[in-house]
Image (cartoon, rainbow, N blue to C red):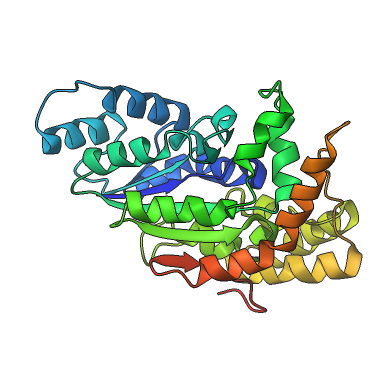
Amino acid sequence: MELILHIGAHGTDGGRIAGWIRQNQTTFEAGGVAVPDPAQFVAGLERALAPGQPGDPLAREEAFLRAQGATGARRRMVVSAPDILMPPQAVLHPEGFYQHGLAARLDGLRGLFPRTRVTLALAVRQASGLVPDLLAGGTLTDIDTLKPALSDETLPWTALVQGLRAGLPRARLVVWRHEDLTRVWPRVVAGMVPAGAGLPAAGLLELAAADLGAEARLRLGRYLSRTGPVNAGTLSRLAEVFADRFGRAGTPRAVLADGPAWLSRRLADLDAGYLTEWGDLSSQAGVQALQPRSIEG
């Protein structure tokens, strides 16, 4: 069994990848790919990883996968659910950014899937966009508790990636920048279908056009209605051309109202180091980093 887990992160992609998977569930399943409901998958994980679960590890693995829709004909499962690692309110935690309960969770996942080939798909994001989005959920009442979560002593995404590599050393880890999604999405979603299979078409335009302004989106839709379907690489290139020519969408950003000065300074520092951190992540052993390129395959 191959298990592809799109683990977010929280505050990235706006549910677009999960939406594409959901729109194409029938096509996925007809091609031998199980597509469980994300909420039910996470709930099933909670039950399977609860203390005191009896039984042989291989039997537990098979029982869990079957309960999520895996059969003899379905040898791949795709799930998009950031809560697989932790709920959003635990991301900014005194233990550190994405560190609360992470080691125990990964240890549980490693024990639950002794035979399954696991791929983790993760987007990282600039702090000044990510943190306000996370705080907008209203789960944090005392903003000063963020200080340990955004400590000066660690680079947040580096710590998470190192934790993932240590906790699930046999898993593949695919990483991209949230800011690059409109340029790398063909490779992101291609990794979720079996080798040689075409990409299910429903929802691809939404992925390609996410960065387009209203006029660019309208003109691209009209163009495609005349030309007919195109492959993902061509669609990605067309979207870039139409965005450059007719305008990109504004990027709404949550604003920290009356936030403390230390937080603004810390976010600015993290932003300044973001490109350097991304370069370090990209070169880590066991990490497949999806870089933008001028021509998408």
Residue occupying image coordinates x 70% and y 55%: 270
Work out whether residue 129 can be spotted: yes
Query: Seen in the image, is 239 located left or right of residue 105?
Result: right
- Residue 177, x across and y down, in percent: 62, 59
Q: Nearer the viewer, residue 143 or 7?
A: 143
Q: Is residue 279 above or below residue 18?
A: below
Q: Residue at the spot x=75%, y=62% of the render?
A: 272
x%, y% of residue 216?
85, 59
Find the residue positioned furthest to the bottom.
294
Q: How many marks?
A: 0
Vertical order, 283 against 205 (above or below): below
Q: Position of residue 27 (x, y in %)?
A: 44, 46
Q: Is residue 295 above or below residue 102?
A: below
Residue drawn at point x = 39 percent, y = 24 percent? 43
Which one is in front, 280 or 294? 280
- Horizontal side, residue 112 vs residue 246: left or right: left
| Residue located farthest toward the front when viewing the structure as drawn | 153
Quadrant where the C terminus sits is: bottom right
Residue lying at the far left of the rendered structure: 56
Residue 49's quadrant in the figure?
top left
Q: Residue 195: where, in percent of width, then height?
A: 36, 65
Out of 98 and 292, give the one closest to the viewer.
98
Front residue (pair 93, 47): 93
Query: Residue at coordinates 14% horizontally, 36% vertically from top-left?
Result: 57
* Quarter occupied by residue 239: bottom right
Query: Is residue 230 at all visible to an observer of this figure?
Result: no
Residue 162 position by quadrant:
bottom left
* On screen, residue 62 above or below 297: above
